[in-house]
Amino acid sequence: MSDFSKYFLMINEDDPEGTEKTVIAYTLLKTQGTDAGKIDWDTATMKAKIPSEHGNLNHVCRVYDAKGHSIYIKQAGLETRISKDMTASLDRNRQESEILELEEKMAPGMVPHIYFFDTVMCASGMEDCSDFEVMRDAMLEHKTFPRFAEDISTFMARTLLLSSDVVMDHKEKKELTRRFITPDLCDITEKLVLMEPYLGSSRNNVFPPNREFVEKELYRDDALHLEVSKLKFNFMTNAQALLHGDLHTGSVFIKPDATKIFDCEFGTFAPMGYDIGNVVANMIFAYDNGLSADDDVFCSWCLDAVEKTIDLFISKFSTLYDEAVTEPMAKVPGFKEYYIDSILRDTAGYAGTELHRRTVGMANVVDVTSIKDERKRLLAERINILAGKDYILHQGRFKTGKDFVDAVLNAREAAVKTL
Ligand code: SR1
Ligand code: MG
């Protein structure tokens, strides 16, 4: 058995028994002397199981015993799970762990607690949230979560504003900017989200019956390409705040009375609207799925959540701004309004790019791909494409939650006519 002094991939889906032995030994070793060390493991009943559902990049294993103790071990592999040809720096585990620690301070109770992280094995021990559901999975069953808009708006207003130059000491922020930049993860976003859906990359996953529509609407629209190129350069150069960086509904643990945000390895300093736009777009994917099942209650809830998320974000951000602002020039009358306006513009733009990349790019979403009926799937995809274009081409028009929702309703009306 290894002493874990040299990196190897210890979580191997093809060898659950070997993984179990190794991960239990690792957990016992690493949880000594940490918060988790206070857990008095019942070693005779300890188990380590790989959950059936996984993300695109990493390996996870739940360790637990018969006395109710548990922890999640997450490890970065050299190859990504989505594609063996795609690699991402092993340092992403440290980056994610450190960001979660910071976010826990900025938005207490809203992220899983990190017990330890280990830069040799590129692994971390994280609070077990298996009493929560992954929000995307729950929404595939059309479950609704009345607290979501309240919680996600709090999380975004706090983490984004408190890590920006409006509030954070500028030298400290620049230090953090250096610490939270993983070039190959930024590269994934820059290519997968902000380029390939528009240039017809061979890595795109286009639903064949929608190919012609995609080519016309996304690959051959020069005005759209120009706006996306501006969004790409904004993402690469505007280190506005520490983002989660991949804030989709698969990065949210949820239950009726609580929400926790996880999986922030793509976190970096970039425009705030990237996170907010991701939330908007992913609620639209859930709406698409509800539409395919004619579930009006679920669909209304999804759109209501979009509207409330935007409106609550604006009011919470504005209140917190007045309380927490430290930068003298950010107190100049009119600056706050200008700043919020620019965040909303970016939100619209990046909601658009997320809508497009998850519909035609490499990493699709199951909310849409699981729609079996061809016509209904086409409707869903075309809503995403048209609403996304409206967001990107008219970024300055989206000032309230209702504006964001109206774009979806208009896109639905227009998409129906194309079928
Ligand atoms: C290669 S990773 C593909 C996507 O999965 C992650 O969750 C990010 O969204 C990334 O773009
Ligand atoms: Mg992820």
Image: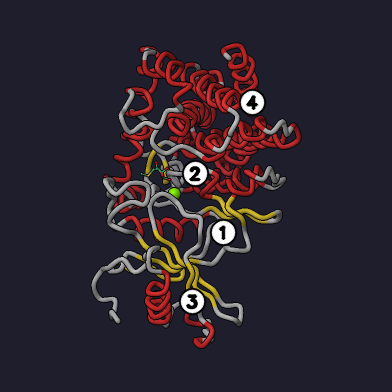
Which secondary structure lies at badge 2? loop
Comparing marks 1 and 2, which lies closer to the viewer?
2
Which callout, 1 or 2, points at the residue further toward the start of the chain?
A: 1
What whole-number distance in Å separates the C-alpha atoms at marks 2 and 3? 27 Å
Let me know if residue 333 appears in the view: no
Q: Which mark is residue 247?
A: 2
Q: Amino acid at mark 4?
A: Val
Which secondary structure lies at badge 3? helix
Which callout, 2 or 3, points at the residue further toward the start of the chain?
A: 3
Residue density around tag 4, few if under 14, some if 14–19, many if 20 or more, within 10 Å: many
What whole-number distance in Å separates the C-alpha atoms at marks 4 and 3? 44 Å
- Name the residue tied to disc 4: 405
What whole-number distance in Å separates the C-alpha atoms at marks 4 and 2? 19 Å
Q: Which mark is residue 108?
A: 1
**Mark 2 in CB contact with mark 3 (< 8 angstroms):** no
Residue 325 x, y percent position in the rendering: 50, 43
